[in-house]
């Protein structure tokens, strides 16, 4: 594989290319890396950059300088797969690296084009770039460090560059799970000891421990990665059994009513029970609690649940039965907490939800799993009916989740829709490929 790097500062690469595995990859003829200095593509004393059009003080690399550098490198090493670097590009990750490796392998020549100053003239990227890569949502002074970072990841994928192919296969982000923890001598360091199982010599137990550690680390620290991956049904079951259990409660008391914003109770809606039960089952919720203190409402819910849990409905529609089997009727939220305590031996972390953007001392966004899960306790999502959970109630909950919002000011979702959206945003397996 030939690799060409075009840069304003080729000297930056020299120590990098002469160090460790990158050096060895070249010595072993696994890759040939050549550097082109953009200054060598301009006439003597001519600038390689020019001011941007319009207001603003920025400078850009001149298109004809970049063109000359690209054409020169292609003349020497053949047509290349061209990777440009920009903060506005596609975010680099292991999958992106692998897909570029596949595309570049056909051409046997990959060209890396990092910019400096304000970047590239937009036409140059449009014309030449096969891939525009960003190393994250931040702006660096130039694309050289991103290009070196790309090279480190890219070279790892070339067979022979890393001594043990097994290390590459087990790398984090090569599949849904990150790598397991590793330890070396000394056995005890700063009062922390290497886990017994790692030194036990029991291969089977070690494999099991490694898998469980990797699974938990991925769930608790890299959930957004995990949820973006394809998982087999077996893997889904393992994820669900290792993450904190989740519960849902729908409150018909402690809710805001009518125009005067009084706090009181609401009637039960059978559609809510059906739809929330079905969403709960889809996202692995342990139990869904319908909370109403009103005796007549309890009677209605009791009849509905009886029909689907033990009555004719259980035979008539098995899927509906499966969803409604996990619904419980209770009079107040304390009962929900007690029931979860009985099941789990620990009280749940309570996350309240609201359509209103209210201040709370502990706000959660949909990216804050780590905060909610750090307690290693079950999680109870509480949803309100009527005009939503009262301020007094919200203040007592451990956390308040940010409202679900679209790009409009219309803010009137039904609670069953809100539950579905929230469960999907919090627990959904949202595939990226
Ligand atoms: C100062 S930056 C230009 C930033 C540009 N004005 C913007 O806001 O999109 C100059 C060059 O550094 C490189 N660069 C900066 N941040 C980067 C990032 N996060 N990922 C990849 N390349 C980056 C790119 O090659 C970019 O053209």
Image (tube, helix red, strand yellow):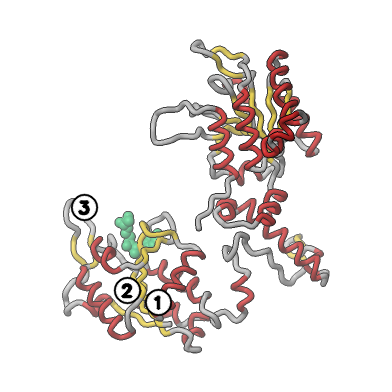
Q: Determine the image quadrant of residue 103.
A: bottom left
Q: Residues within 10 Å of mark 1 (few under 14, many from 20)?
A: some
For residue 13, the mark is 1
SS of the residue at dot 3? loop
On the picture, is 250 further left or further right than 209? left
At horizontal 64% and vertical 52% (from top left) the residue drawn is 219
* Residue pointed to by mark 3: 56
Instruction: State whether residue 394 appears in this view.
Output: yes
SS of the residue at dot 1? helix
What separation in Å lies between label 2 and label 1 (alpha carbons)?
9 Å
What separation in Å lies between label 1 and label 3 (alpha carbons)?
31 Å
Question: Considering only vertical position in the picture, is 177 above or below 292?
Answer: below
What separation in Å lies between label 2 and label 3 (alpha carbons)?
24 Å
Question: Considering only vertical position in the picture, is 272 above or below 323?
Answer: above
Q: Nearer the viewer, residue 92 or 229?
A: 229
At horizontal 58% and vertical 42% (from top left) the residue drawn is 426
Q: Nearer the viewer, residue 72 or 118?
A: 72
Q: Nearer the viewer, residue 226 or 36?
A: 226
Q: Position of residue 355 (x, y in %)?
A: 51, 28
Q: Position of residue 302 (x, y in %)?
A: 73, 22
SS of the residue at dot 2? strand
Q: Are marks 2 and 1 in contact (CB under 8 Å)?
A: yes
Q: Position of residue 350 (x, y in %)?
A: 66, 33
* Residue pointed to by mark 2: 7
On the picture, is 226 further left or further right than 194? left
Q: In this view, which residue lies farthest toward the bottom?
A: 28
């Amino acid at each position: 594989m030939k690799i060409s790097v075009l840069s304003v500062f080729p000297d930056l690469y020299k120590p990098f290319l002469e160090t460790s595995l990158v050096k060895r990859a070249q010595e072993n003829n696994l890759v040939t890396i050549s550097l082109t200095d953009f200054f060598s593509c301009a006439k003597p004393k001519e600038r390689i950059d020019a001011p941007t059009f319009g207001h603003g003080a920025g400078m850009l690399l001149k298109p004809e300088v970049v063109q000359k550098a690209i054409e020169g490198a292609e003349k020497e090493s053949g047509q290349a797969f061209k990777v440009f670097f920009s903060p506005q590009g596609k975010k680099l990750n292991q999958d992106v690296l692998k897909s570029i490796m596949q595309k570049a392998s056909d051409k046997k020549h990959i060209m890396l084009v990092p910019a400096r100053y304000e970047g590239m003239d937009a036409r140059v990227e449009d014309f030449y770039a096969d891939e525009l890569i960003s190393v994250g949502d931040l702006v660096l002074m130039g694309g050289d460090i991103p290009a070196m970072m790309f090279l480190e990841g890219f070279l790892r994928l070339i067979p022979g560059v890393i001594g043990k192919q097994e290390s590459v296969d087990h790398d984090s982000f090569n599949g849904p799970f990150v790598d397991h923890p590793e330890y070396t001598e000394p056995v005890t360091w700063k009062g922390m000891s290497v886990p017994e199982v790692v030194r036990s010599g029991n291969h089977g137990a070690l494999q099991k421990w490694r898998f469980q550690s990797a699974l938990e680390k991925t769930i608790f620290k890299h959930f957004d990665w995990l949820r973006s991956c394809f998982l087999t049904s077996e893997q889904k079951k393992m994820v669900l059994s290792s993450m904190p259990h989740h519960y849902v409660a729908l409150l018909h008391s402690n809710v805001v009513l009518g125009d005067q914003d009084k706090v009181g109770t609401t009637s039960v809606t059978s559609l809510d029970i059906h739809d929330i039960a079905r969403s709960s089952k889809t996202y692995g919720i342990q139990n869904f609690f319908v909370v109403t203190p009103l005796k007549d409402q309890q009677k209605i819910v009791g009849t509905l649940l009886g029909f689907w849990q033990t009555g004719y409905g259980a035979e008539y529609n098995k899927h509906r039965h499966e969803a409604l089997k996990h619904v419980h009727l209770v009079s107040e939220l304390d009962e929900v907490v007690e029931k979860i305590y009985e099941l789990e031996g620990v009280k749940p972390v309570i996350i309240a939800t609201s359509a209103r953007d209210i201040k709370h001392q502990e706000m959660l966004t949909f990216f804050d799993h780590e905060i909610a899960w750090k307690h290693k306790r079950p999680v109870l999502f509480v949803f309100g009916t009527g005009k939503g959970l009262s301020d007094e109630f919200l203040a007592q909950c451990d956390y308040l989740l940010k409202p679900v919002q679209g790009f409009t000011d219309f803010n009137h979702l039904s609670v069953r829709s809100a539950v579905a959206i929230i469960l999907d945003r919090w627990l959904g397996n949202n595939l990226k490929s």
